[in-house]
């Protein structure tokens, strides 16, 4: 198993350090179109105007079981809008799994453990002590469960996507903090305002803590629209090939083979007159 450390990495350093991962992901995506998609998994991905992170750690089955892990220093990844203690990913021939331990997303989302798994084509999400804006999350969410946690915050749990090659991808959790399409003059709800100081620190936007309306948020974003899009946990796998057992034709016997014993079979026949 590979082990990496997120020790004192700033947003720029994270981007530089994961360039190879982006290239590998691009290669994997291109090759998937040429044949069946192999089992694969990743732990976490961030899309944000101020702090982004490609899917890491990404692993893919290549004939042997693959696994990787990332260990946070003091439970945090420097320069990213979340803190985490440990992220693992593994992929085998017909199974894949990722887990994220001690996740805290700017005070908005917390979980002791998020485990996304896929086994023989079936899969799901397990959440231990999870909450969004203080509201508890289900331990085993229903497929593609969408939770509008606040007017600006949407949470999608246990999303399932089937592919033409027979594989299925299970995405554990997607957190979207969006302002696009919202009334600019709309006031932020109390729960969102309470979480803004932590989010402001994570995104290195101190003015964010003073936002009162949707317009205040969009004015502070470099590109506007989306404050944060976070994916936690992805696992892709396919069912094992169904092997048909063909009846073996016995070799010709020498001499006079023993006749098989008669078998008695009962039938119910209609009576005709």
Image (cartoon, rainbow, N blue to C red):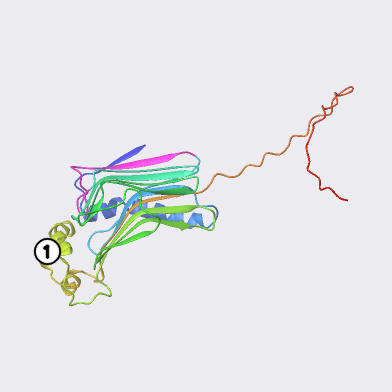
Magenta extent: 64-83
Q: Position of residue 8 (x, y in %)?
A: 19, 47
How many numbered markers are drawn? 1
Q: Position of residue 66 (x, y in %)?
A: 42, 40
Task: Indicate whether residue 167 is drawn in magenta.
Answer: no
Q: Residue at x 18, y 63 (%)?
A: 192
Q: Quadrant of residue 203?
A: bottom left
The answer to whether any part of residue 61 appears in the image is no
Q: Is residue 169 placed above or below 224 in the rendered structure? A: above
Q: Is residue 121 left or right of residue 144?
A: right
Q: Is residue 163 left or right of residue 138?
A: right
Q: Position of residue 46 (x, y in %)?
A: 29, 57
Q: Is residue 129 placed above or below 148 in the rendered structure? A: above
Q: Residues within 10 Å of mark 1 (few under 14, many from 20)?
A: some
Task: Indicate whether residue 67 is drawn in magenta.
Answer: yes
The answer to whether any part of residue 201 appears in the image is yes
Q: Is residue 180 left or right of residue 248?
A: left
Q: Main secondary structure of the magenta part?
A: loop
Nearer to me, 89 or 270: 270
Secondary structure state at the residue bearing disc 1: helix
Q: Quadrant of residue 99?
A: top left
Q: Is residue 208 left or right of residue 153?
A: left
In the current view of this chain or complex, which residue is farthest to the front? 273
Nearer to me, 125 or 207: 125
Nearer to me, 73 or 153: 153
Which residue has dot 1 on it? 209
Q: Residue at x 12, y 59 (%)?
A: 197
Nearer to me, 134 or 261: 261
Query: Considering the image in quadrants, where does the N terminus appear?
Result: top left
Q: Position of residue 148 (x, y in %)?
A: 28, 64
């Amino acid at each position: 198993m590979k082990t990496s450390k997120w020790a004192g990495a700033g947003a720029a350093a994270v981007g530089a350090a994961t360039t190879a991962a982006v290239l590998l992901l691009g290669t994997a995506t291109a090759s998937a179109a040429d044949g069946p998609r192999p089992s694969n998994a990743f732990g976490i991905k961030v899309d944000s105007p101020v702090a982004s992170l490609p899917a890491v750690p990404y692993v893919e089955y290549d004939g042997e079981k693959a696994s990787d892990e990332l260990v946070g220093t003091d439970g945090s990844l420097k320069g990213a809008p979340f803190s985490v203690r440990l992220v693992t990913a593994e992929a085998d021939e017909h199974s894949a799994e990722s887990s994220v331990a001690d996740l805290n997303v700017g005070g908005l989302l917390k979980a002791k453990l998020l485990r996304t798994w896929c086994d023989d084509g079936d899969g799901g999400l397990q959440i231990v002590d999870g909450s969004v804006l203080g509201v508890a999350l289900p331990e085993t969410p229903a497929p593609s469960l969408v939770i509008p946690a606040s007017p600006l915050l949407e949470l999608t749990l246990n999303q399932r996507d089937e592919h033409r090659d027979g594989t299925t991808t299970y995405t554990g959790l997607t957190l979207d903090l969006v302002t696009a399409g919202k009334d600019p003059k709309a006031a932020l709800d109390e729960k969102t305002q309470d979480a803004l100081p932590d989010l402001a620190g994570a995104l290195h936007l101190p003015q964010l803590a003073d936002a009162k309306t949707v317009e205040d948020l969009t004015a502070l974003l470099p590109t506007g629209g989306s404050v944060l899009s976070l994916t936690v946990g992805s696992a892709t796998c396919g069912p094992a090939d169904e092997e048909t057992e063909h009846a073996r034709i016995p070799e010709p016997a020498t001499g006079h083979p023993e006749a098989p014993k008669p078998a008695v079979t009962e039938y119910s026949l209609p009576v005709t007159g």
